[in-house]
Image: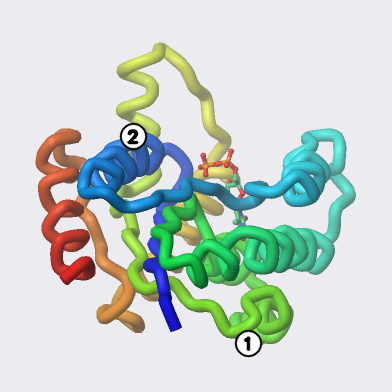
Amino acid sequence: MKRGIFITVEGTDGSGKTTQIKLMSEYLKEKGFQVIVTREPGGTEIGEKIRSVILDPENTRMGENTELMLYAACRAQLVSEVIKPELEKGNIIICDRFIDSSYAYQGAGRGIDLNLVTDINRVALDGITPDITFFFDISPKVALLRRVAATGADRIEKEEMDFHMRVYSGYKKLATLYPERIKSVESTRCMDEIFNELKEYLDEILE
Ligand code: TYD
């Protein structure tokens, strides 16, 4: 059976994923591959609707388990509507966030048992795992300082920063647990340096 390549990109908010996703997609297209860039939560019409419910700031009463299941519902739709069919066609998919976001944010961040995250997501994943995952490794504290310097923004409450630091530690732990799949990319460096490293990984996986 023809099988494409499934790449996921992870990191805390503001870790610089978006620019690198664009560069990777251009690089792979130039090499003649069909590349589909998608994101979570979202990526499908139904998923985008679920996304707006999850991220609506008015939904302050949303329970942790509700949130966990909505992310999983979004994922189920993306897997069945986009990821599986595109992989079967032999295409390359780059997904901005995937299952590791649930481990890092709902698991490490909110404190939900990781086994529960696994159980809830089993149906959503339907046997799909990423071939390679890039973890954009930059401490949320450093990322915030950079944003402040660049935009003059942004106040962030201590509680919020504590949450992002827990998410960050969660990602670091995942990267040490699954070193074969999850590649930590040191993301305090400049754009070109980061992209050069990504290209090496891409060339390797394309061989
Ligand atoms: P988004 O605006 O797309 O953030 P980013 O540009 O940083 O990717 O918002 C997605 C938010 O959803 C982000 O804060 C991470 C969170 N998230 C989870 O908590 N769990 C998940 O399973 C996923 C996919 C995302």
| Residue 108 in view here | no
Q: Element under label 1?
A: helix
* Mark 1 and mark 2: Cα distance apart in space: 33 Å
From the viewer's perspective, is 207 left or right of 46? left
From the viewer's perspective, is 180 left or right of 140? left
Mark 2 neighbour class, 10 Å CA radius: few under 14, some 14 to 19, many 20 or more:
few
Q: Amino acid at mark 2?
A: Thr
Residue 196: x and y, percent? Answer: 11, 47
Query: In front here: 123 or 159?
Result: 123
Mark 1 neighbour class, 10 Å CA radius: few under 14, some 14 to 19, many 20 or more:
few
In the figure, 160 relative to 69: above or below? above
Please name the residue that numbered disc 2 is placed on: 19
In the figure, 192 relative to 165: above or below? above
- Residue 115 got which mark? 1
Q: Residue at x 80, y 49 (%)?
A: 46
- Quadrant for the C terminus in the image: bottom left
Q: Element under label 2?
A: helix
Residue 186: x and y, percent? Answer: 20, 52
Residue 201 occupies quadrant: bottom left
Circle 1 or circle 2, nearest the eye: 2
Residue 104: x and y, percent? Answer: 52, 65
Q: Earlier in the sequence, mark 1 or mark 2?
A: 2
